[in-house]
Every structure is written in C-alpha cells, then in structure tokens.
Amino acid sequence: MDIEALADKLVSWIREEVTARGCLGVVVGMSGGIDSAVVAALCQRAFPESTLGVMMPCHSHPDDKAHAQAVAEKFALPTVEVVLDDIYSALLKALPAFKSDTSLRHLAQANLKPRLRMVTLYYIANQLRYIVAGSSNRSEVAIGYFTKYGDGGVDIMPLGNMVKGQVRELARYLDIPGEIIDKPPSAGLWEGQTDEAEMGVSYEALDGFILSGTVPDEVRRKIESMMANSTHKRSLPPVPEF
C-alpha cells in the first residue's frame, strides 16, 4: 500500500471508530514528538472541526511545547494547555515514600506523568463527548514501551500497526515539521531522556525484528525478553476461571 493510500485509510478508520462509539470528535495529547504529531494530523483530517490538541507540560523541556505548537499552527488545530507541574509535585509530596531501590522509585515517579496526562485527557474528552486517540506505535506496543494506564490508556491507537520507521515515512508525507521528525525520540519523562537509551535497543533494530526477524542473536534475546515481560500491558487484567 502506498503512503497516500495508507493515510487515507487511517483517516477513514479514525472517523469510523469515533462514529461507532456515538462520539463527536477526538482529543489528542500533543507532546511535541513525531508520533503525537502524526496522530494529530490524521485526526484533524478525519474531524476538521472537532479535533482538540491538549498540551500537558509536566516539568517538560521548552522545546516540547514549541514543537507541539508548531504542529498545531501548521494544521490549524485548536489546542488547550494544562500545566501539570504543581499537581505532579504536590502528588509526589503527598504520596508515601518507601525505602525501595532508587531505580524503582525513579520509574514510579516518572510513570506518574503519563498517568496524570491520561486523567487530564479523559476529563476533557468526557465533557466534549470525544474519544482519546493515543500515539503509541507498533514498535513500542510490542515491547511494552508505554506506561500502563498512562499513555497506554486510550480509546484508539491509529499507529498501532506501524513500526517507527513507517511512522517517520508517514510524517514526511503529512509534512510534519522537519525538526520534529529528526529529533531523538523521547517520552520526556526526565531531563535528557531518550527512548532508545531507555529501551537499550535502537528503533532500527526493533523495527527489523518485528518486520523480518533479522537481528543479531543478542538483540533478539533482549527484545524477546521485553516482549515477554510486558505481556500484562497488552492484556486485560486476568480473572479466575472459576
């Protein structure tokens, strides 16, 4: 399928999914990254009058907001901003602190950010009778590189069958600003954080494994381990069979 046909099919799919739920439009969290930019552009094509971009800085890098605004301006997308800095800090202060491993505590604190964003998106979506569109792609979903009940808590994932390289191709077709396409992918969870450094594997290798399985054995073992350990993220909570 060529890229133009793919874009058209995704727009139609978004429209069908929203309509099937009896809803009126789409809410998209805009992080300033390539995935959310592509989802925002697709949703705007599907619902030109009822797509809302939501910027939710939470001790974020200023470039993230600037890039999100650039996308909004390019596609004439209305936005709202909800600053989560003080809410996040207050919640950390109120929550109990346990004597746990430093890396576990750091991860728990980082995961609060996408979970606060999820709450924000659904609060807005519920008022407008919109649905929440997520920006996770196939590469991330495959290894569980998303926060459970955070950025994974959405109604639809338009990019869920596209690996990262395919998302970049679609971004170029949609004319997403070049600085967004070219910058290192990051969830913005902490200063200097990048996806590939946190995953411990490049998107190129991950895409290659998903599409063809042609990766070195060491990389294969790492990816297969991440896939196995994140199975719970892609499934409903288990219930007893009795």
Image (spheres, rainbow, N blue to C red):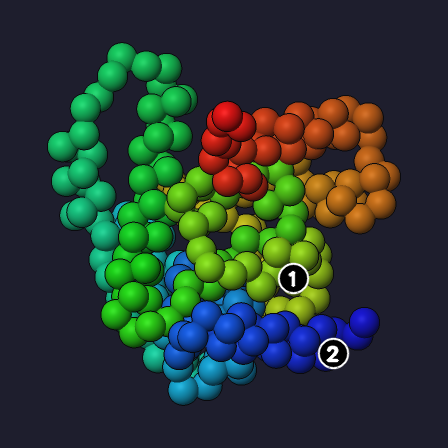
Q: Furthest-front residue in view?
A: 242
- In the image, 197 versus 214, the foreground residue is 214
Q: Amino acid at mark 1?
A: Val
- Look at the image and tell me whether residue 50 can be seen: yes
Q: Nearer the viewer, mark 1 or mark 2?
A: 2
Who comes first in sequence, dot 1 or dot 2?
Answer: 2
Which residue is the site of mark 2? 5
Residue that protrudes farthest toward the bottom in the picture: 49
Are the residues at dot 1 and dot 2 in contact (C-beta closer than 8 Å)?
no
Q: Residue at x 53, y 70 (%)?
A: 17
x and y percentages locating residue 55 in the rendered image: 33, 63
Label 2: which secondary element: helix
Query: Which residue: 44% across, 56% down?
Result: 154
Q: Residue 48 appears at what percent x and percent y?
A: 46, 86
C-alpha distance separating marks 1 and 2: 14 Å
Quick check: 168 above or below 210? below
Give residue 8's position: percent from left, percent from top.
67, 80
Left/right of residue 29 with respect to residue 170 in the rendered view: left
Measured along the vertical axis of the image, is residue 241 above or below residue 194?
Answer: above
Most foreground residue, 23 or 208: 23
Name the disc covering residue 153, or none. Answer: none
Q: Amino acid at mark 2?
A: Ala
At 78% across and 41% down in the image, what residue appears?
209
Between residue 150 and residue 41, name the one nearer to us: 150
Specify whether residue 200 is in view.
no
Query: Is 112 on the left-hand or right-hand side of 202?
Result: left
Image coordinates for residue 12, horizontal then vertical, percent: 61, 78
